[in-house]
Image (cartoon, rainbow, N blue to C red):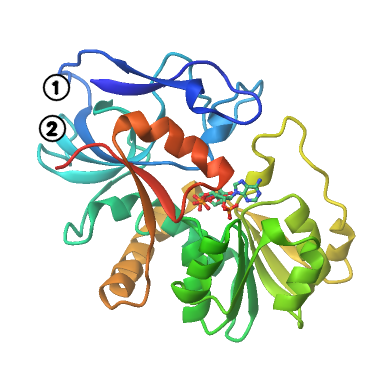
């Protein structure tokens, strides 16, 4: 069984060398007397929150830290090989928490869903139909509470979550613009995902001026993925009663000391609501509704989706660290095996 392990806790920017691929032997039989599943991993998801798990925290975080020498865990799509779980049998396809390895023994069933639509590419359950897609849905609809005609801004807009937020905004009848870190991504935003406006934040001298250009009337909803200087510039451009759905702040994840926010005073006169959320809290109440909706959108061609696939477990460390340099174009995942 080939697996990806964390070598040591990470400070600063993670590198491929912080992880290693090792081999061990495994028994492909679920242990008797406990509830467990042996699964063959097909696709693994690379997600920004995994960075936080690479650092040792003194206080427990909402996700546990990885343990050096042990396999990296995250979201994936897998096929059940053997199971003592009453609801899963050999041959079933599912997605949820698994290990970055060829075969995993799953005993934590907190996030585990059967795949109901095998006619849709299975890899989509790491993205558009999985955790990132559901994050876009929760953040945009449940936190952002959009109304037709509103002005929506999305950062990291060409990524797994951002590309879908932009399309939800268009389906709701909003005006939407996004920022991304390359001209290729800006082109995708405008010409594939249907954004009304987009800019390459790495080429802008003045983020405030770029936002004024895209939003002469101001922003009603900011879908926040990056934090840092972008958040500061957005605060200046929010409209009265605007909402900020605080999904993530990737620009801060590799910093030992987080940058301050200078324009927070804007929340008072503009009567803003800033609300953070963690997608995990919403699976039980809303995932099924989301999946039904998204499957219809995909089948009827209302949503397009771009993924960036790294082939093979050996490429998983580079795929994960690439998120922090913006190397991924669309949803980054790792293809481990065929069914
Ligand atoms: P993406 O697919 O968007 O990949 C991350 C992207 O972030 C990169 O491609 C890069 O794009 C951008 N980026 C990296 N470093 C920086 C930086 N220093 N400044 C600005 N942008 C940067 O990731 P996801 O769509 O999976 O995640 C997007 C956000 O959503 C993250 O903040 C993540 O933590 C958050 N999230 C939150 C969840 C929740 O429950 N709250 C659940 C899932 C995700 P570019 O080339 O444009 O710079």
In the figure, 55 relative to 43: above or below? above
The answer to whether 118 appears left or right of 181 in the picture is left
**Residue, x 64% and y 81% (percent of image)?**
150
What x and y, as percent, mark residue 174?
Answer: 57, 82
Q: Which of these two is toward me, 206 or 284?
A: 206
In the figure, 47 relative to 178: above or below? above
**Disc 1, SS:** loop
Q: Which of these two is toward me, 138 or 329?
A: 329
Contact between marks 1 and 2 (CB within 8 A): the answer is yes
Would residue 138 be visible to someone looking at this image? Answer: no
Mark 1 sits on what residue? 28
Q: Which of these two is toward me, 187 or 290?
A: 187
**Disc 2, SS:** strand
What x and y, as percent, mark residue 1?
Answer: 23, 20
**Residue, x 59% and y 31% (percent of image)?**
61
**Residue, x 69% and y 68% (percent of image)?**
243
């Amino acid at each position: 069984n080939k697996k990806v392990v964390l070598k040591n806790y990470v400070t600063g920017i993670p590198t491929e060398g912080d992880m290693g691929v090792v081999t061990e032997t495994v028994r492909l039989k679920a242990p008797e007397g406990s509830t467990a599943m042996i699964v063959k991993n097909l696709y693994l998801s690379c997600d920004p929150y995994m960075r936080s798990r690479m650092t040792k925290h003194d206080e427990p975080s909402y996700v546990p830290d990885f343990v050096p020498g042990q396999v990296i865990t995250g979201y994936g799509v897998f096929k059940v090989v053997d199971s003592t779980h009453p609801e899963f049998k050999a041959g079933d396809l599912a997605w949820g928490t698994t290990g970055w390895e060829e075969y995993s023994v799953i005993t934590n069933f907190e996030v585990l869903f059967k795949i109901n639509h095998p006619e849709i590419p299975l890899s989509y359950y790491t993205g558009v139909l999985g955790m990132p897609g559901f994050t876009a849905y929760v953040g945009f609809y449940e936190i952002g509470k959009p109304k037709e005609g509103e002005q929506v801004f999305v950062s990291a807009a060409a990524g797994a979550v951002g590309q879908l937020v932009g399309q939800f905004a268009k389906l709701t009848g909003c005006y939407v613009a996004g920022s991304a870190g390359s001209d290729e991504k800006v082109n995708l935003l405008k010409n594939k995902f249907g954004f009304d406006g987009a800019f390459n934040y790495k080429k802008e001298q003045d983020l405030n001026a770029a936002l004024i250009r895209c939003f002469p009337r101001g922003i009603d909803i900011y879908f926040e993925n990056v934090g840092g200087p972008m958040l500061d510039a957005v605060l200046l451009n929010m409209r009265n009663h605007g909402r900020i759905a605080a999904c993530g702040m990737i620009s801060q994840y590799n910093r030992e000391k987080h940058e301050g926010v200078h324009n927070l005073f804007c929340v008072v006169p503009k009567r803003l609501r800033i609300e953070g959320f963690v997608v995990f809290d919403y699976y039980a109440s809303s995932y099924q509704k989301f999946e039904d909706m998204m499957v219809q959108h995909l089948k009827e061609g209302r949503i397009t989706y771009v993924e960036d696939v790294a082939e093979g477990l050996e490429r998983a460390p580079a795929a994960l660290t690439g998120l922090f340099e913006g190397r991924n174009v669309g949803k980054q995942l790792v293809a481990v095996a065929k069914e």
